[in-house]
Every structure is written in C-alpha cells, then in structure tokens.
Image (tube, grey):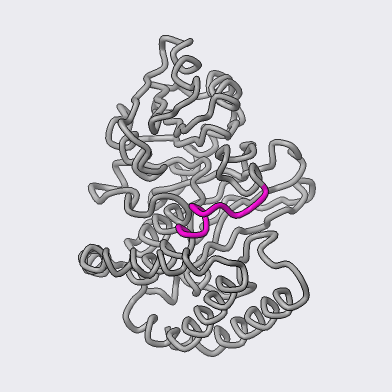
Amino acid sequence: MPALSVCVINYNGEECLHATLAAIRKIRVEVAEVMVIDSASTDDSARIVLQDPSHRLLRLADNRGPGRARNVGFSEAVSDLVLFIDNDVVVSPEAPGHLIRAFADDESATFAMPWVLYAHDPDTIQYDGAGSHFLGLMALENADRPVKGHEVPTRPIQSLVTACFLVDRARWGTPPLFDESLFIYLEDHDLGLRARIMGHRILSVPTPCYHGRGTPGLSLRSVGHYTDLRIENLITNRWALLLKNYQARSLLVLAPFLAVFEFFQLAGAIKKGWLRHWGWGCRTILSRRESIRRKRRAIQEARMTPDRDILGGGPIPFSGGLFKGRIETLAARLIDSGSRGYWALARHLV
C-alpha cells in the first residue's frame, strides 16, 4: 500500500489529543507523516503534540475554521493520500487500510469515509454516510443504528462528513478543497456537493472510527445548547451552499418550497430569540454576493453531474433538541410532511 499522510485538525483539543495520536501510532499501514494543523489553540495542545518528535506541528496564526486548517494540511502533505482526522476522533488500526483498498477497487472514487461510531457507545453508529437533502441540508445515514446486524458493503454516497475521511490528491486535482468562507458547519457538505457535481465518487467503507464529544464550548454534545456561532453559521452557510452549488433549474423548481421553509425558519428564529442571527446571515450573504457569484460560475462550469443525480428527499434532517413544546413540534411535522410531498413532485423536474 502507498504511504499515508495523516492530518489531525486541532483547536483546543488537549483533552482528546492523547487518545487520537495514540490511535494513529497503531495504524496498520505505512504512515509517511503525522501532521497536526493547529488553529491558534489557547490550551496545552502544542506541548502534547511535540511530546513525540516525529509529529509535524503547523501552527496557524489565527482560527479561521476547520476548512482553512484542512486546506493547509492538504497542500502541505507529502503523500497524495491524505487521511484527515478531527482531534476528537479515534481511528481503528485497520480503518486506513480498508479505505485505501476501497480506492484501489474503485478508480473513480476520490473520497472515502469510515463508519463513525460513538466513542461513549461503540456499539451504536453515529452515522455511516450522508445524503444531500434538497433543502440544502446534510442528511446523515443510518444514524443511531446498532452496529450489530448492520451488514452493509462499501457503497457510494452523495455527501461527505469530515470527522474522518481519506482523499486522493492526485484524483482531486487543483481546485480548492474547502470553501474557507464557510467558517464552520456545512463546510463538509459543501465539499461533498462540489465533489459530486464535478463527477467524483464518495465511498462509505464499513470500518470503524470513534467520535468523541466535539469541539469544547461549541459542539452541541459538548455544551448542550445552540451557541451563537452555531446558529449564525448554520443559517448563513446553508444559503451560500444553495446559491453556489444548485443549478438554476433546480433553484427555480424548488423556489416555492424553499420560500416556505425560510418562512418557518424565520418564524422559529423569532420565537427562539434568534432573529439577530437570522439578520446577521442576511447581511453576510449580501456582503459576499460577488464572491458567491464567482464561485457559482466556476462550480457550474466544472459540472459533470446534474442535480437530479445528487439531491434527495426524505425526512428533513433537523438537529436533535431543536424543537421544544407542542407548537414547535407540530410545526416541524407540518413542514416535514410538506417537504416530502413537494419533493415527490419536484424530483421529476429538477
């Protein structure tokens, strides 16, 4: 097997880096290097990394999000096969080998991700792939299913979750990997959509890694509530994703229900006290309109796969704990039911 560059993405990960780096040392393929890209951490992360002199630490001057850190690792890697791992992910020893073999078996594949299991409950799948919901949302596949009895072979998927994934730089080419304007959240779904648009295949490979509690002070599993940063970026990045990646025909066909969804989103923002976050998103999109237009032009010129072969319907992938009380729950059910009905008609026209 070819040697592998392992790239750990870190921000204030001192609580979990020990386990992540220890797992990397047990990988059963040749590792050309272990890089840690640190986004200006303020904790003891650097000391932990440098305890092993073979580690390569790249310290960024500021925190511009995981997309920026991954782009740096992608360009700096010595191998064309780059395994990205978030700092709270423990990869199993055999997983990288299975991912590399999946590439060898499918020369059209550019990305591969393992099954992601809960670190606190390794018998349960957190997700094993992702789809592209037509509303501009990532739909996690097989979430919260027991590992036992889930016998699914390597399969193509429509989007990419980047907690742990392998990319072949030679197959990807020269376009930027991540859009760095999407600071955090949906930056991985944006990459997955662009990859599929450009004709690349993304594989889900039945081999495990184990996901911890997420970024301290930010992850929903870590803090238990929606932070300002999370709300603003989820709203704004979804709009940018739609405007850049969808074909004009798709936007036209989907416009009526996208408008309905935005009405519900605005109403929910008002009820939850998030109206200023919604307004922040509007101002941000307007300020980036020229940049979005340029990116859209480049993406559409590189298109190899139509939206009808990428987008899907099904349940709206709302985040857990988003709705509280009878009114919010009823509204969610109504918008979800309407989404399914609309997609049943619209999917033939996209």
**In this orientation, does residue 301 appear?**
yes
Q: What segment is highlighted magenta in the picture?
A: 224-233
Q: Is residue 164 above or below residue 254?
A: above
Q: Is residue 315 above or below residue 80?
A: below
Quadrant of image for the C terminus: bottom left
Image side of residue 244 versus residue 239, left or right: left
Q: Is residue 91 above or below residue 189?
A: above
Quadrant of image for the N terminus: top left
Magenta span dominant secondary structure: helix
Image side of residue 299 versus residue 350, left or right: left
Task: Assess whether residue 227 is covered by the magenta stretch.
Answer: yes
In percent of width and height, residue 343 lies at: 55, 83
Q: Is residue 81 above or below residue 276?
A: above
At x 45%, y 36%, the residue is 84
Q: Quadrant of residue 268?
A: bottom right
At x 46%, y 18%, the residue is 49
Q: Which one is in front, 62 or 185?
A: 62
Count every numbered label the image shows and give the total.
0
In percent of width and height, residue 158 lies at: 49, 62
Q: Quadrant of residue 80?
A: top left
At x 77%, y 49%, the residue is 146
At x 48%, y 53%, the residue is 185
Image side of residue 151 versus residue 270, left or right: right
Q: Which one is in front, 323 or 341?
A: 323
Task: Assess whether residue 313 is covered by the magenta stretch.
Answer: no
In percent of width and height, residue 240 lies at: 36, 66
In percent of width and height, residue 346 lies at: 50, 87
**In this orientation, does residue 208 appear?**
no
